[in-house]
Amino acid sequence: MKKVSLTGIKPTGSLHIGNYFGAIKPALELSKEYDARYFIADYHALNQVKNPEELERCIREVAAGWLASGLDPEKVIFYRQSSIPEVFELSTMLMAFTSKGLMNRAHAYKAAVQENQDKGIDPDTGVNIGLFTYPILMAADIILFNSDVVPVGKDQVQHIEMAQDIAQSVNAAYKTDVLKIPQARITESVAVVPGLDGRKMSKSYDNAIPLFGPEDQLHKLIMKIVTNSQGVAEPKDPDVSQIFLLYKLFASQEEQNSLAARYREGGMGWGEAKEELFRVVNRELSPLRERFNAIMADREGLDNILARGAEKARPIADTTVKRFRKAAGID
Ligand code: TRP
């Protein structure tokens, strides 16, 4: 039997090319080797997004984004967290095995408290219980599906460790392997994707290139990439150029060699390098964008895919919850 990989995607904004290379592509790769599960963590997003139109749009966009990027819903299980009530049942059960001290140490919660303390205000200001128990809900997501590996970025490793701790507490209490202990699989194959300003591409830095934006927007953003003031004639070092770093993600080896040579020769200005970058980015993203738009236009089709995914997921979830309830004496 294949091992299980599972990853959750929080629908809190539109996808950008940093998400594509840093998370989507490596996670989809795993479906070759693992029994892969992907889900939209919409109840996690609810902590942040309180505008219903926005949340609905984010859920659909993120779902369509994964499908457009190549997720095959026939071969994997693809569902919305909110369609699986067992997640919330398991989450409640896990709370009985989670110490408050463990949650106190969670990075996101600690940062929120620290920010308040720095301002000299009540440490609980603006901190909701959903943020505090975020790692428990995430542990439930993972444990429910008997996940062996969870592909995540470095920022999520602590959450996986907490899921391990919590599952181990359950197994220790009942002196048997009720729950599978998950392992983090850190995706570091791809270097940090640089944003328009040279910092890591991130929604929060406002320096991202959207994955599915229209072609003219893509062109405009690429032309806005910050460069130094070297003139056209000057030879340039490709290895320190953001334009070139992005180019490497989209161009063939031959194209990379040829552009690197042109950088070093001199005679090519930044404008021309950007046009060449736009050409290869658009070449890869055009078909993705078309698929994305087609999926977004077919509401019912997308709903059906997600409903079918939930149908496949629920029997697995049910088995885990039943096993736990039985071990706990709540049969
Ligand atoms: N916390 C993850 C993030 O912000 C999203 C997430 C929720 C998740 N549940 C998960 C990731 C379970 C992996 C497994 O990116």
Image: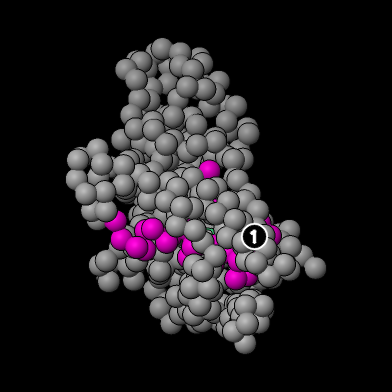
Q: Which residue is mark 1?
A: 168
State the image quarter where residue 6 is shown. bottom right
Residue at horizontal 49 percent and vertical 58 percent from the top: 99
Residue 139 percent coordinates (x, y): 54, 62
Residue 24 percent coordinates (x, y): 54, 54
Which amino acid type corresponds to the residue marked 1 in the rendered image? Gln
Q: Which region shows up in magenta?
A: 127-154
Q: Indicate whether residue 134 is drawn in magenta.
A: yes
108 on left or right of 98? left
Residue 122 percent coordinates (x, y): 21, 49
- Between residue 195 and residue 291, name the one nearer to us: 195
120 on left or right of 132? left
- Between residue 265 and residue 85, name the one nearer to us: 85
- Between residue 142 and residue 307, name the one nearer to us: 142
Residue at horizontal 35 percent and vertical 15 percent from the top: 230
Q: Is residue 242 above or below residue 101?
A: above
